[in-house]
Amino acid sequence: MIFWILFLVWWLITFLQPIYINGKWLMKGIAGMTLAPFVFYRKEVYLDSEQFRKHEKAHILQQRMFSPVIFLIIYSFHYLINRYLGMDHFTAYYNIIFEKLARQAEKE
């Protein structure tokens, strides 16, 4: 029962406005990461980038659609499948469907 309550609460908070948090202590080698409604960024300069904001907003919308838990499961599973297929880390990440859709959203 507690799982479903947490699941529902986390999904509901994805509808809050994005909350940007400096996460340089958390991230190495990536610009940002979204666990809706929180957007962690590594450098302040990213906040001025419309491309960065659109990309992370796309991940928020994806998490609203699937729920953060389901999003993370699919995201991780897709990455692991790509690695199993012989892709290196960057290529596997670059080919995750959610990343492809977020890069497409950057251009809109």
Image: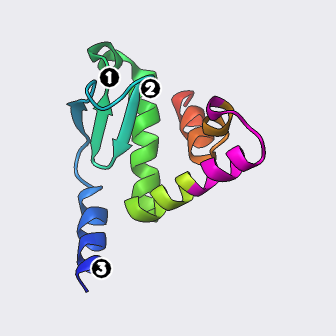
Quarter of the image for residue 68 reads bottom left
* Amino acid residing under circle 2: Ile
> Spatial distance from mark 2 to mark 3, Cα to Cα?
31 Å
- In the rendered image, residue 88, in percent from the top left (x then y), is placed at 69, 33
**Mark 2 and 1 residues: CB-CB less than 8 Å, in contact?**
yes
Residue ID for mark 2: 30
Q: Is residue 72 left or right of residue 26?
A: right
Q: Considering the numbered disc 2 on the image, is that residue within a helix, a strand or a loop?
A: loop
Separation of marks 2 and 1 at Cα, in angstroms: 7 Å
Residue 21 vs residue 100: left or right? left
Rendered-image quadrant of the N terminus: bottom left
Image location (x, y in percent) of residue 65: 45, 61
Three-letter code for the amino acid on which mark 1 is drawn? Arg
Q: Is the magenta stretch mostly helix, strand or loop?
A: helix
Q: Quadrant of residue 86?
A: top right
Q: Which of marks 1 and 3 is nearer the N terminus?
A: 3
Q: Residue at x 29, y 77 (%)?
A: 3
Q: In this view, does 53 lie above or below 8?
A: above
The residue wearing badge 1 is 42
Q: What residue type is labelled 3?
A: Trp
- Range covered by the magenta-colored residues: 77-90
Residue 23 in the figure: left or right of residue 32: left
Residue ID at (22%, 81%): 2
Give the image location of residue 70, x and y in percent. Answer: 46, 64
Whichever of callouts 2 and 1 sits on the residue coming sooner in the sequence is 2
Q: Is mark 1 on a helix, strand or loop?
A: loop
Decide whether residue 86 is among the magenta residues.
yes
User: How far apart are the alpha carbons under marks 1 and 3?
Assistant: 32 Å
The numbered dot on residue 57 is none
Q: Please tell me the numbered disc located at residue 4.
A: 3
